[in-house]
Image (cartoon, rainbow, N blue to C red):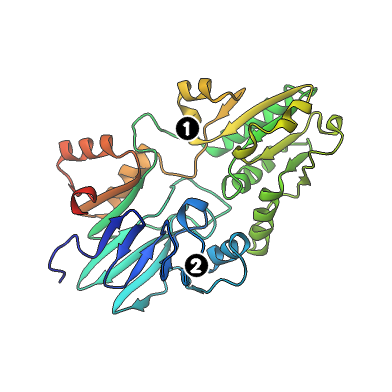
Amino acid sequence: MIQDSTDLIKYSDQGLYCELADTWIDPHKPVNRALITHAHMDHFTFGCNEYISTYETSVILKERIGSEINIKTYDYGKEFKINGINISFHPSGHILGSSQIKFNFGGEIWLITGDFKRQKDETCQEFEKVKTDYLISESTFGLPIFKWEEPQKTAFDISKWVNLSPDKTSILFCYSLGKAQRLLNEIKKTNFKNKIYTHTSINKMNNCYKKLGIDISETNKFDKTQNIDAYKGSLILLPPALNKGSFLKKFKEIQTGFASGWMSIRALRKRSGYDKGFAISDHADWEAILKTLKETEAKNVFFHHGDSEALIRYLNEKNSINVLDFESKK
């Protein structure tokens, strides 16, 4: 057994670290060996000597980092050893290839959720319930105010938003990886008839999904040099980084929207500068986080990647789980 129960996995300014395996999880800086939960930019870094992930994540990482990276892949549920520690990946439901990471050592199990969601999503594997002794959970939307609607309702709202303004160009900002593919899949089910254009960064991720067997709707490539009138009545998906692009001024009639869980907060919708906010997230909401804590049967939990104060207060009042703090262990 581990002498100090908080010793197996620690947190530093470089990310989560398992000293016994000499392995980092989603490091922020280049390291020798990195376990990667998924291929969003804030969960990996360039320049690591060795990456370890699911095959699906490796395909996306190679698109984003470069095909020459040194990466090992393992199927979901397949155990592998590093310095005597049994490690395995399990679906987290966040995006295609995303994983929870399970560590089994000395009779104790540690589980890192990575980013996760519990809603149905046909573009990625469904979240897997994994029992554990120690849980390290994300808490991006760890407040009771966050409660997601069904994604199909959001897709119908987007379709209606576009169709009610046929003389305008509708631009929807969304993350290029995961969110865009999920939206395209859901919008397809609404029998949306208008043309859909997508940015190059989204097209690249669409191609990765298609390569991995996910049915993504065909879209037209957005070209900001094209005649602006050609986009009237259509839906354009762009990454959020372009929401201040000077090319937007070329459009005479335009309406803008943002698809994000943060759009469920009215004040943020008003301050965002978008005409419309659509609350859809690839993270767990408050109830889904609590449900997951219960289903893992964890007796000890750490939170990271988000706002955990309300969760900690709630769990302490319920006295149902031991909440540990990485900050006090640095």
**Viewed as shown, does residue 168 lie left or right of 186?**
right
Please tell me which residue is depicted at 75% across the width and 40% down the height of the picture: 196
Residue that numbered label 2 is attached to: 54
Q: Quadrant of the C terminus?
A: bottom left
Front in this rendered view, residue 269 or 102: 269
| Label 2, residues with CA under 10 Å away: few <14, some 14-19, many ≥20 | many
Residue 29 rendering spot, x and y as whole percentages: 43, 59
Q: State the image quarter where residue 30 is shown.
A: bottom left
Tell whether 267 sits left or right of 64: left
Residue designated by label 1 = 262
Q: Nearer the viewer, residue 100 or 238?
A: 238
Specify whether 220 is left or right of 60. right
Q: Position of residue 102 (x, y in %)?
A: 34, 65
- Up-down: is 114 above or below 1? above
For residue 319, which quarter of the picture?
Answer: top left
The residue type indicated by label 1 comes to: Trp
Residue 249's mark? none
Alpha carbon separation for disc pair 1 and 2 = 29 Å
Quadrant of the image containing the N terminus: bottom left
Residue 208 visible in the shown view: yes
* Kind of residue sitting beneath label 2: Thr
Q: State the SS at label 1.
A: helix
Occupied quadrant, residue 18: bottom left
Q: Position of residue 16 (x, y in %)?
A: 33, 58
Relative height, residue 32 to residue 210 (above, below): below
For marks 1 and 2 on the same chain, the one whose residue lies earlier in the sequence: 2
